[in-house]
């Protein structure tokens, strides 16, 4: 169901606002605000309610709410003077005034696939989740053996890059987990997730196994246990673990398989996964290789949203790590490709993630926060989305949110390719509260984590310098220079645009003291 009012249509499920059929760009929080006002157009919506719904109860100032209202009015061609669409109820709240008609949400005008994309949908990785095999005959185990896989199917359906076989089909193969070829052939699934569940004393034990159905190879497995009294928590852990593992392991496996074939023989999805395999190496050569793969994927399928988001990621790295010659052009390109990705698929968490990070490059962390919040709304188990939200909270000085976001990210993905960044953000957050000793420990940990780049070495130099560990600071200073000879305070402060002026001054002074 969508809404029509005046020249506008708004699809709340697709998160899509159009004027006379043309997309209207608006920040996620602005669209959240408009959607809530329309849903409750029969009454006034208080400022407290807006804070609770749009900001999830986080502390928010009246000025921030007023800013989003102004943005909403601008998107809807309204104004504070006219108030023909959104009316302000003085000191109390707001009400949606425009006459709204409910309509069936429109589908895209064309369903034709662009040239070169005939097989793009069919090459998308697919998975069948089988009911678990209960090792015991208790009724509770039998119920959980189907209930948990059902929850996994629902959670996996949020992953836009993965095709999930419906429960009605996959559950017909209960007990066939060992016959991967049968399941894969019958369901057309490239991957099969199976498991066992048993009662061991007072504990529930679940063993999970993810297999490549075509090759008969297990690519991931885990064993989770919990007391019977904590079964609900165990169910949540299982779902989170599976979603995060698949988000990491399946693309790795797809890239490995794609690398065995000639690039010219690959379709858009396979080329895209080759790009992902290079994306987290953070070197100029790897970034250029990833960029080429994403560009080829787009050439094969111009409407491939994730490939545009991947290209945005590479241009973000060009600007963030100063890998190219024109940071401003790279920053604009990162935003542009993220916007294209969002227009093509407004429900993909990865596109929202790349859009949010593009606002770091322009020193707008508060705007970034809205896009990143939407990314984890779309996929609550998106580890990198939680990390990016914590990064943004660090920039705005919300230290409590930093700790919460990083803890969630680490619990979801303890071996994430951005692990060094998670530790580095924690170190910078600890510096904000004056705990230099802990900051130095986390910074050392960040700088020794695989994938760490020169900015992370600079964080370690700063944290150790502020803690009086000058020999260690000198070591990291030399490492930063080795990785990036032209590294300087300007580069660092552009990458970490702190809102708090005192925090910026502290970092700048220490960088200058160390010769950056």
Image (spheres, grey):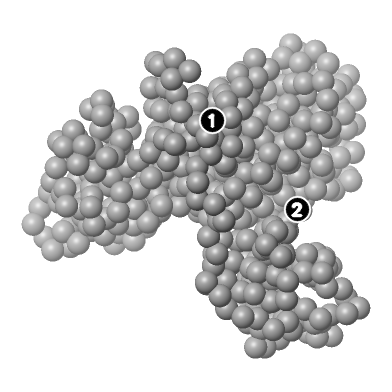
Picture residue at 58% right of the left edge, 29% below the top: 299
Residue 440 higher or lower than 165, as above or below: above
Instruction: Judge from the rendering whether residue 399 lies leftward or rightward of residue 106; answer left or right.
Output: right
Picture residue at 50% right of the left edge, 53% below the top: 380
Give the image location of residue 170, x and y in percent. 23, 50
Picture residue at 29% right of the left edge, 62% below the top: 229
- Extreme residue toward the left, this view: 137
The quarter of the displayed image where residue 419 is located: top right
**Marks 2 and 1, Cα distance to the nearest angstrom?**
33 Å
Mark 2 burial class by Cα count in 10 Å: few <14, some 14-19, many 20+: some
The quarter of the displayed image where residue 428 is located: top right
Q: Which is nearer the eye, 133 or 140?
A: 133
Q: Do the residues under discs 2 and 1 have CB atoms within 8 angstroms?
A: no
Q: Secondary structure at mark 2?
A: helix
Q: Kindly identify which numbered label has been placed on residue 342.
A: none
Q: Secondary structure at mark 1?
A: helix
Give the image location of residue 349, x and y in percent. 56, 48
- Extreme residue toward the bottom, this view: 42
Residue 509 higher or lower than 79, as above or below: above
**Number of numbered discs visible in the structure rendering:** 2
User: Mark 1 highlights which residue?
Assistant: 300
User: Mark 2 highlights which residue?
Assistant: 367
Instruction: Judge from the rendering whether residue 268 lies leftward or rightward of residue 316; answer left or right.
Output: left
Instruction: Judge from the rendering whether residue 381 lies leftward or rightward of residue 472; answer left or right.
Output: left
Q: Is residue 374 visible?
A: yes
Quadrant of the drawing holding the C terminus: top right
Tell which circle, 2 or 1, labels the residue nearer the N-terminal end. 1
Q: Which is nearer the eye, 176 or 451?
A: 176
The quarter of the displayed image where residue 61 is located: bottom right
Give the image location of residue 213, x and y in percent. 25, 33
Picture residue at 50% right of the left edge, 46% below the top: 112
Give the image location of residue 386, x and y in percent. 58, 47
């Amino acid at each position: 169901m969508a809404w029509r009012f005046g020249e506008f249509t708004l699809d709340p499920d697709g998160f899509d606002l159009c004027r006379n059929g043309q997309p209207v760009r608006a920040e996620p929080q602005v669209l959240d605000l408009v959607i809530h006002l329309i849903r409750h157009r029969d009454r006034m919506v208080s400022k407290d309610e807006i804070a609770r719904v749009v900001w999830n109860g986080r502390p928010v100032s009246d000025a921030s709410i007023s800013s989003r209202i102004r943005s909403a009015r601008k998107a809807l061609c309204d104004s504070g003077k006219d108030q023909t669409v959104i009316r302000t109820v003085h000191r109390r709240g707001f009400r949606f005034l425009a006459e709204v008609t409910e309509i069936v949400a429109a589908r895209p005008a064309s369903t034709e696939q662009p040239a070169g994309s005939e097989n793009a949908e069919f090459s998308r990785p697919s998975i069948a989740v089988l009911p678990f095999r209960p090792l015991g005959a208790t009724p509770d185990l039998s119920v959980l053996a189907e209930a948990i896989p059902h929850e996994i199917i629902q959670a996996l359906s949020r992953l836009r890059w993965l095709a999930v076989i419906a429960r009605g089909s996959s559950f017909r193969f209960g007990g066939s987990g060992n016959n991967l070829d049968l399941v894969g052939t019958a369901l057309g699934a490239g991957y099969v997730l199976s498991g066992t569940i048993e009662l061991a004393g007072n504990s529930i034990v679940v063993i999970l196994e993810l297999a490549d159905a075509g090759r008969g190879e297990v690519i991931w497995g885990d064993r989770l246990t919990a007391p019977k009294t904590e079964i609900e928590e165990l169910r949540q852990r299982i779902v989170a673990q599976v979603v995060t593992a698949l988000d990491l392991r399946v693309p790795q496996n797809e890239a490995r398989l794609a690398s065995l074939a000639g690039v010219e023989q690959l379709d858009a999805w396979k080329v895209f996964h080759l790009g992902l395999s290079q994306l987290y190496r953070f070197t100029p050569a790897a970034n250029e290789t990833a960029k080429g793969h994403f560009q080829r994927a787009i050439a094969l399928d111009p409407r491939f949203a994730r490939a545009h988001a991947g290209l945005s990621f590479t241009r973000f790295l060009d600007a963030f790590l100063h890998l190219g010659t024109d940071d401003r052009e790279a920053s604009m390109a990162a935003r542009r490709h993220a916007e294209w990705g969002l227009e093509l698929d407004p429900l993909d968490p990865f596109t929202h993630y790349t859009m949010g990070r593009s606002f770091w490059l322009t020193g707008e962390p508060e705007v970034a926060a809205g896009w990143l919040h939407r990314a984890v709304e779309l996929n609550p188990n998106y580890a990198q989305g939680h990390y990016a939200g914590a990064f943004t909270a660090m920039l705005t000085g919300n230290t409590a949110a930093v700790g919460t976001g990083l803890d969630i990210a680490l619990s979801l993905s303890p071996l994430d390719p951005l692990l060094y960044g998670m530790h580095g953000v924690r170190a910078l957050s600890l510096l904000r509260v004056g705990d230099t000793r802990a900051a130095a420990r986390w910074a050392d940990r960040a700088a020794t984590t695989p994938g760490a780049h020169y900015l992370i070495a600079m964080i370690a130099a700063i944290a150790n310098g502020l803690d009086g560990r000058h020999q260690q600071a000198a070591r990291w200073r030399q490492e930063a220079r080795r990785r990036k000879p032209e590294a300087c305070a300007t580069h660092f402060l552009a990458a970490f645009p702190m809102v708090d002026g005192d925090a910026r001054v502290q970092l700048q002074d220490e960088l200058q003291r160390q010769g950056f």
